[in-house]
Amino acid sequence: MTASLSHTPSRRAFLRQVAAGSLLTQVPLTLQSQAPRPPKPIRAAQIGTGHAHAAGKWKTLLRSEDFQMVGLTEPDPAWQFHLGKGDYAGAKVLEMEAILKDSTIQMVAVESRVEHLLDHAEACLEAGKHIHLDKPAGADWDHFKRVVTLARQQNRRLQMGYMFRYNPAFELCFRAVREGWLGKIFAVEAVMGKKSGDSTRQDLARFEGGTMFELGCHVIDAVVYLLGAPDKVHAFQRQTRSDDGLADNQLAVLEYPDALATVRSALMDVDGFSRRQLVVCGEFGRLEIRPLEPPKVRLTLEKAAGGFDPGVHDIEVENTPRYVKDFQDLAQSIRTGKPLDFGYDHDLVVQETVLRASGMW
């Protein structure tokens, strides 16, 4: 059975909509002209081009109606070859000091190499900027805690860059668990892998956390959102090659009072994108997302819930581009003061869990 999240309106509802539309056409032009103007874009900049998601974030922010990109900087000389080329062609290159001192720049996307993320995030917060901080949040737990504390004290937004938070399939999963469609959750199973070449392997080998630290963190973020902080985390690491020392085959088991979660991440996973998955099992049903992008959802229910009958449902969801809704939430939070959908406390639990699951703590 294939289901859609959109529902066809009844004939009566359709006629009401048509009638409403015809009335709108009769509104005087003077009233129509008083429609609220779109909010002024938030001036923003980007620090770093060395992160794997840096180019994607830059392009998304350039297209955004919520942000006006003033420019970018690359403090690391080894990565300055990106500036003015490819995805960054035409971008205004600024000094980092200029970005920090410009009081009109409200938000900075921190897209540096992982080892520089926390230093640059801290500098931005000290300068009074809101930040989008890419993942994982460095390898130094105490430093990340200081960054979060600083964001709280400064009342600045700190948004982490885990890329599935606003994936429509994940949003549906979060809703299903929140509204109890599946009953008590007893298991969550996540897989996040790919097949990587030598250059990527050498890059990731710099961190003892391996592929779990780099890739697994994305789905650990979702597991923590669903189940909260685990009681215990067990990390298992294997190396398929001895020449680079990379932990490229990893498993983490997260213990909860009434549930177990497993997260797998490997870098020799042939066609790994198609095997990426999140499976949530409850006493009354199961929700499976596989693959994660473009998302495919299967919902299996023992009894009716959420407008779905008992049985198996393949649910159509949008294939929303990465990062778009993240930055929409960040812009709304900056403008209105509303908390981010994923807050400071959640991010602290995620980072601790990532470090434990990666065998780094």
Image (cartoon, helix red, strand yellow):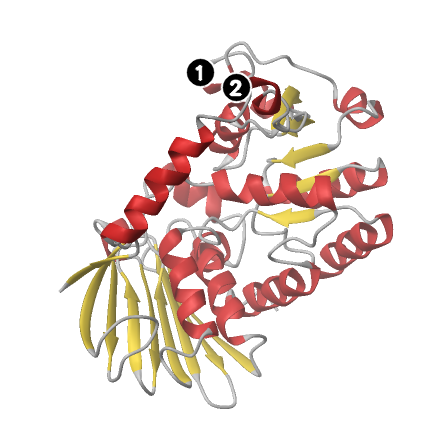
Residue at point 61% right, 35% down? 112
Residue 184 vs 8, above or below: the answer is below
Compared across the picture, whether 165 is left or right of 186 comes to right
Q: Horizontally, is 172 left or right of 269 in the view?
A: right
Q: Nearer the viewer, mark 2 or mark 1?
A: 1
Is residue 295 or residue 302 the one in the foreground? Answer: 302
Q: Secondary structure at mark 1?
A: helix
- Residue at 64%, 48% in the rendered image: 159
Observer able to see residue 96? yes
- Position of the N terminus, as image quadrant, is bottom left
Badge 1 density bin: few <14, some 14–19, many ≥20, Cα 10 Å: few
Residue 279, how many percent across, how many down?
32, 70
Query: Which residue appears at 44% of the width and 26% of the height?
Result: 25
Residue 116 is marked as: none
Q: Position of residue 156 (x, y in %)?
A: 78, 46
Q: Quadrant of residue 76?
A: top right
54 over 17 or under it: above or below? above
Neighbourhood count class around disc 2 (C-alpha, 10 Å): few under 14, some 14–19, many 20 upward: some
In the image, farthest residue toward the bottom: 257
Percent from the top left, x then y, of residue 53? 49, 37
Q: Is residue 248 visible?
A: no
Q: In front here: 123 or 206?
A: 123
Q: Position of residue 142 (x, y in %)?
A: 76, 60
Which secondary structure, mark 2? helix
Question: Which amino acid, by three-letter code, is at mark 2?
Answer: His
The quadrant in which the C terminus is found is: bottom right
Q: Residue at x 47, y 69 (%)?
A: 223
Q: Are marks 2 and 1 in contact (CB under 8 Å)?
A: yes
On the image, numbered disc 1 is attached to which residue? 86
Residue type of the residue flagged with mark 1? Gly
- Residue 82's disc number: 2
Q: Which is more toward the observer, 210 or 12?
A: 12
